[in-house]
Image (cartoon, rainbow, N blue to C red):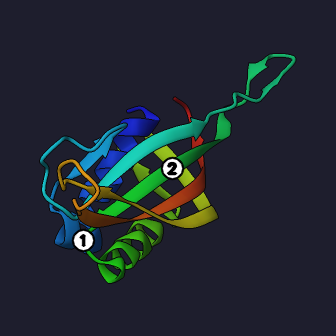
């Protein structure tokens, strides 16, 4: 099992996360028209530490999790559920995860829809962007 599959499995096995998003967890981009709330994931940095005999078994991967919702309260609750799920060491299949640290959390969002012209308005979607450093063993 690779890092991406392991993170996805952890989030889908988390009752607090799936109670909010069901199965709406995607890598890279949120599918157009998908209902909210939802989570998108993206690897920001994945260095491969090495020594004279090759790569180390354990490494730290930096993961960006974007928690999308219609309200700020729901985006914050989803971010808290994701952090709580990923912070604890666990083994998923043959993949060993160590503890995760929160490197940053940002209030973001965007206005969607609305049409064209100066009088148009859209809907604001809240996003909590959380960057986590996750220790793990293997690919």
Q: Quadrant of the N terminus?
A: top left
Pick the front one: 27 or 13: 27
Residue at 29 percent across and 66 percent down: it is 124
Q: Where 13 falls versus 25 (above or below)?
A: below
Q: Where is residue 134 in the image (x, y as percent from the top left)?
A: 59, 51
Query: Residue reaching furthest top?
Result: 53
Please determine whether, in this image, residue 70 is positioned above or below residue 119: below
Disc number lying in front (2 or 1): 1
Circle 1 — which element? loop
Q: Can you tell which quarter of the image residue 49 is in?
A: top right
Q: Mark 2 and mark 1: span between their CA atoms? A: 20 Å
* Rendered image: mark on residue 124: none
Q: Mark 2 points at which residue?
A: 64
Q: Is 130 left or right of 51, judged from the image as shown? A: left
Residue furthest out toward the bottom: 73
Question: Label 1, on which residue?
Answer: 70
Q: Dot 2: what SS?
A: strand
Residue shown at 45%/37% (left/top)? Answer: 3
**Number of callouts:** 2
User: Which residue is depicted at the point 81% across and 16% down?
Assistant: 53
In depth, the one of 79 and 16 nearer the eye is 79
Q: Provide residue 80's location: percent of width, then percent of height.
A: 43, 75
């Amino acid at each position: 099992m690779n890092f991406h599959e392991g993170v996805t499995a952890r989030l889908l096995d988390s009752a607090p996360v799936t109670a909010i998003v069901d199965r709406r967890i995607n890598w890279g981009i949120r599918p157009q028209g998908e209902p909210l709330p939802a989570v998108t994931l993206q690897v920001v940095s994945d260095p491969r530490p090495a020594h004279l005999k090759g790569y180390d078994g354990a490494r730290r991967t930096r993961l960006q999790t974007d928690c999308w919702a219609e309200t700020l309260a729901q985006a914050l609750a989803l971010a808290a559920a994701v952090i709580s799920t990923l912070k604890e060491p666990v083994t998923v299949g043959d993949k060993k995860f160590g503890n995760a640290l929160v490197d940053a959390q940002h209030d973001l969002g965007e206005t969607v829809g609305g049409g064209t012209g100066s009088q148009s308005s859209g809907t604001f979607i809240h996003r909590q962007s959380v960057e986590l450093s996750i220790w793990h063993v293997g690919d």
